[in-house]
Image (cartoon, rainbow, N blue to C red):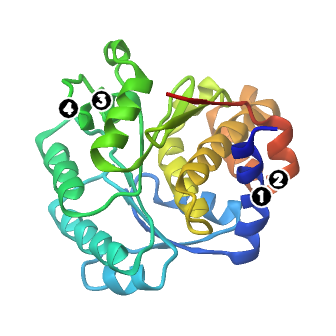
Amino acid sequence: MNTVINTCAAFFNEIRKKNPLIHNITNYVTVNDCANAVLAIGASPIMADDIAEVEEIASMSSALVINIGTLNQRTITSMIKAAKKANEINIPVVLDPVGAGASTLRNKAVEELLSQVKIDVIRGNLSELSFIAGFEVSTKGVDASESDEKYNALDIAKLVCDRYSSIVGITGKIDIISDGNRYVKVANGHKLLSKVTGTGCMTSALVASFCGVTKDFYAATVAGIAAMGIAGEFAYEKAGRLGTGSFRNNIIDALSHMNSTYFLERVKIDEEKY
């Protein structure tokens, strides 16, 4: 069996045993869902973005998530300060560049973060990662634009990996995770995931949760992205036909019951080398 699959499966027992604290500087639209996703998978969330406490909170955490979904000048400063502390104490930093390419403020914030701190994992959609790779994009608010599908996700992932020495996760119909030398394609998920706000933000929070129990950030990114895809499939089977509200709740239910056995039964992963 694929080595990365076995590695990912082992994380589900590890995370519930260690219960890592995950520091989230995230957006106020999805903060509650992110916290619940982290709890459901077995980690512990803390949502702290004030500059007066971010260094202290980062110092006691196992991973840091920076999500620029509802960006403002105050939180940009907090994000950089928290990430520098995370670098100092050697805990992983996961960046979710929500809406990168959509506005000057977001673009500058992403550039500041990538230039001032070491980002271990960048998780976003194709438009966001294409912007980070240096291409012109037509980001549709915080969603990927169909016109940006002209870019090859594998090429974009490798380019960003090589430029920033980060693990890259590009989520879409088929998810791509790369460390620059190898890549994984994850085929789990359901189209209804794109109709519920926060599923991308939750995915980044899950990635950080797994990063909090390992130094293998590549496998942790695969686990977090695949877990959300599997949860989306489960949620649709249980409640998708009732509507997006019921579907949303069942995502959390699926994550709360997910274990290594269920993961191995449902995951659809192909790993290759460039």
Mark sitting earlier along the chain (4/2): 4
211 on left or right of 9:
left
What residue do we see at 75% from left, 38% from top?
2
What residue do we see at 76% from left, 48% from top?
254
Q: Is residue 238 visible?
A: yes
Q: Position of residue 15 (x, y in %)?
A: 70, 67
200 on left or right of 12:
left
Q: Callout 1: helix, strand or loop?
A: helix
Q: CA distance from mark 4 to mark 3?
A: 6 Å
Q: Please give the label number shown on residue 134.
A: 4
Q: Is residue 12 above or below residue 108?
A: below
Q: CA distance from mark 2 to mark 3?
A: 33 Å
Residue on which the image places disc 1: 10
Q: CA distance from mark 3 to mark 1?
A: 32 Å
Q: CA distance from mark 4 to mark 2?
A: 38 Å
Q: Please give the label number shown on residue 260.
A: 2
Q: Is residue 123 above or below residue 188?
A: below
Residue on which the image places disc 3: 130
Cβ–Cβ under 8 Å for marks 1 and 2: yes
184 on left or right of 118:
right
What residue do we see at 24% from left, 79% from top?
51
Q: Is residue 143 visible?
A: no
Q: CA distance from mark 1 to mark 4?
A: 36 Å
